[in-house]
Amino acid sequence: MTHTPTSSTWSVCPECLERIAARRVMRRGSLYLEKTCPRHGDFSTVIWRNADSFAAWQDSRAAEVPDCCPAGCRTCTQHGQRPCCVLLEVTRRCDLACNFCFASSGAPSGPDPDLRTIDFWYSRLLEAGGPFNIQLSGGEPCMRDDLDAIVALGRSRGFPFIQLNTNGLRIAGDPDYLQRLADAGLSTVYLQFDATNDAVYERLRGAKLLSLKQRAIERCAAAHIGIVLVATIVPGINDHALGDILRTGLEYSPAVRGVHFQPVSYFGRYPETPGNDSRMTLPDCMRAVADQSRGLLAREALRPAASEHAQCSFHGTFVYLPDGRLQVLNAGPQPCACNAAAKARDFVARAWAYPQPEQTGTGLSLGGWDAFLERARTHLFTVSGMAFQDAWTLDLERLHRCHIFTVSPEGNLVPFCAYNLTNRSGESLYRGRFRNLP
């Protein structure tokens, strides 16, 4: 069988993380990333199943990848996109021991960064062109008792949208803690939500968690904090659950502002070296959510997002109507070279925050288009997904357009997939212990 390369790019070796040449190759109707390391041999990983749809997701924007990529992010000034969202890792501690964890949370890692260090990070972001959307991450951020002070500090420094990436355990059991976060200015909870049954949680997270997840949603709704349900999708474990997750999100609308699917990527902590049968590509995910939605949405309603590389993510923007239908709303950001990251930041901040009281309208029945606009103000609902890259799938053209960053302990902005990148042995280019300022 002839393997015809469709295009060339750069990647890394999954064993040593050295930069090496790579090819996107069509085989049996799917696209593979193939590469050869002089020391460690050949690697071939599926990156896009059903390649007939690939042409519509080609990214024609120029991508001159710097020679220093991906190891030179500390000093690189040639990155191809501005930040949309920036993660602050405020702890490595966690109250779960999940099989799949980007951050390998829970391992001994030294002290949490103190408030002085976090204030330094906020300052560095402002110097880099912020304010940007902020995600407080970890580990499990709610392990910190002073998380409300971190939120308040960010708001005082001019960051208007701060979301919390959490498993939900503490906010489910401690409404006073959640209220302190709300009072400090927290915008949205980015809630780990992998399924609607405990069998999946036991396999992925090691415990029966569904009732706690539901309680966390109810607590956030009562505190008027927007929620996005975030599912890590692992083939053979919960790839059947996307439709149920979508319907659960709609049941809790308008407090739940959307669902976000993350096909599993293999960096950090995971049970074993991945094969192609353990990969869910972006078109697999889009097809699954459409097929499992029971007619709520069509595959065609999911499109490339705006500022990052087109093959990194998808989104659909909808209005959840009173009769239970999802009406497509073409209000989301579209691929554009004109200040796309800023447009994406603004859209996420509007769409994922809890509807404000003034958005509830007068209560008058206006009918027709006015009624639809009123519903759109309160019941906007997003369906999105992102295919994070690991050492097997990393395409430096995609990485060069990344608009999600993590702040390193030294205050540098590092693209998310580069910061979390680990080789087969778990060694990282960037991730290390927190270091407070002297």
Image: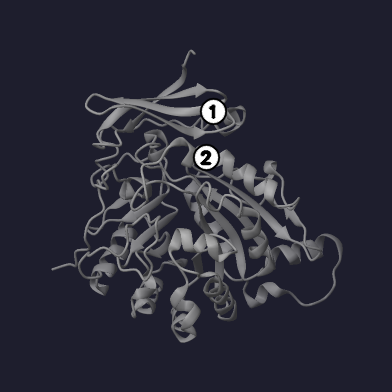
Residue drawn where x is 50% and y is 56% of the image: 345
Q: Is residue 385 above or below residue 167?
A: above
Residue tagged 1:
30
User: Residue visible at 61% across and 67% down?
Assistant: 256
Give the x, y percent position of residue 434.
22, 63
Mark 1 secondary-structure assignment: strand
Is 432 in front, or is 281? 281
- Say what amino acid the circle numbered 2 marks: Thr
Residue at point 48% right, 82% down? 173
Is residue 309 visible to us here? Answer: no
Tag 2 or tag 1, which sits nearer the N-term?
1
Q: CA distance from mark 1 to mark 2?
A: 10 Å
Q: Is residue 292 above or below residue 203?
A: above
The amino acid type found where label 1 is placed reads Ser
Residue annotated with mark 2: 281
- Crowd tier of the residue under label 2, counting other residues whose Cα lies within 10 Å: few below 14, some 14–19, many 20 or above: many
Q: Is residue 411 above or below residue 336?
A: below
In the rendered view, does 138 fall on the left or right side of 321?
left
Left/right placement of residue 111 relative to residue 230 reads left
Tell me, yes or no, if residue 430 can be seen here. yes
Numbered label attached to residue 361: none
Task: Look at the image and tell me in which quarter the C terminus lies.
Answer: bottom left
Residue 391: x %, y % from top left = 34, 39
SS label for mark 2: loop
Residue 270 coordinates in the image, percent (x, y): 37, 51
Name the side, left or right, on which 366 lies relative to 362. Answer: right
In the rendered structure, the answer to whether residue 311 lies left or right of residue 438 reads right
Asked if residue 324 is positioned above or below residue 177 in the image, the reply reads above
Could you say which is closer to the camera, residue 77 or residue 396? 396
Position in image of residue 58 (x %, y %) = 54, 31
Whether residues under marks 1 and 2 lie with C-beta atoms below 8 angstroms apart, the answer is yes
